[in-house]
Amino acid sequence: MDEKFFQQLFDSFSQKLEQTGHPLPSVSIVAEENSDPYRVLVSTILSLRTRDKVTLERSNALFEKAHSFKELEDMDEEELAKIIKPVAFYTKKASDLKNIARIINAEYDGIVPSDLESLLKLPGVGIKTASLTLNLGFNKEAICVDCHVHQILNRLGIVDTKTAEETEKELRRILPRRFWIPLNEVLVRYGQAVCTPVSPWCSQCPLCSWCPKKEVEKSR
């Protein structure tokens, strides 16, 4: 698999998404409006295990109340939890956001750190959240692997991995760097619109003729 192969792959995904008109993921919409790393990091944390519509609504509601980590740290934790409810694990996320705000204010002068190592030290921030923050908040090359990226690339036989972490490591080895930033956005949309986790729309996929459909038990 060379750069030409991946270009053709991305072109196929993008052309199909243009036909479906499927919207951008919530964090991408937040970043399009304002790519402030504060907003990207916070909305990414809220997005974990949460529908895009809810993420976008609750992110915007929070940003109306707290425009910076200083204002976020000053906010009452119970009030914060009420604002972000019903995102998944909203009480835990409220606690994490308060702690993140405290650390960033104390150690980074209220500015989101722009390196992977520092981001991963923040409470509630894993490799996916850190990578997406680098991508959308700083336009830095990092591979963000969520469930859609992991599942689609395994279905296609491009990787043979058991976990998202393994997929991320394998992609670092085989994926040309210019595809690192758009990878997550394109495959998340494709996973929502076509290559869905359950019963994917294989009949509508331009890659159907050669896709091995690994572990696909039922398709449409």
Image (cartoon, rainbow, N blue to C red):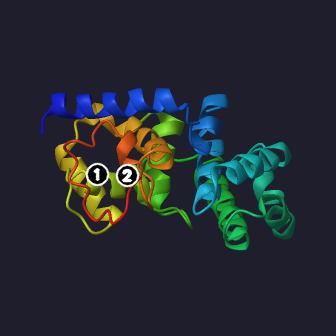
Q: Residue furthest left?
A: 1
Q: Is residue 215 visible?
A: yes
The residue under label 1 is 153
Q: Amino acid at mark 1?
A: Leu
- Between 105 and 56, the one lying in front of the other is 56
Q: Position of residue 143 (x, y in %)?
A: 35, 47
Q: Amino acid at mark 2?
A: Val
> Would residue 157 be found to the left or right of residue 56 on screen?
left
Q: Neighbour class for label 1 at 10 Å: few (<14), some, many (≥20)?
A: some
Q: Neighbour class for label 2 at 10 Å: few (<14), some, many (≥20)?
A: many
Q: Position of residue 16 (x, y in %)?
A: 41, 31
- Between 179 and 209, the one lying in front of the other is 209
- Between 216 and 183, the one lying in front of the other is 216
- Between 114 and 131, the one lying in front of the other is 131
Q: Position of residue 2 (x, y in %)?
A: 13, 34
Asked which secondary structure carries label 2, the reply is: helix
Q: Position of residue 55 (x, y in %)?
A: 68, 52
The residue under label 2 is 149
Distance from disc 2 to disc 1, alpha carbons, whole Å, reads 6 Å
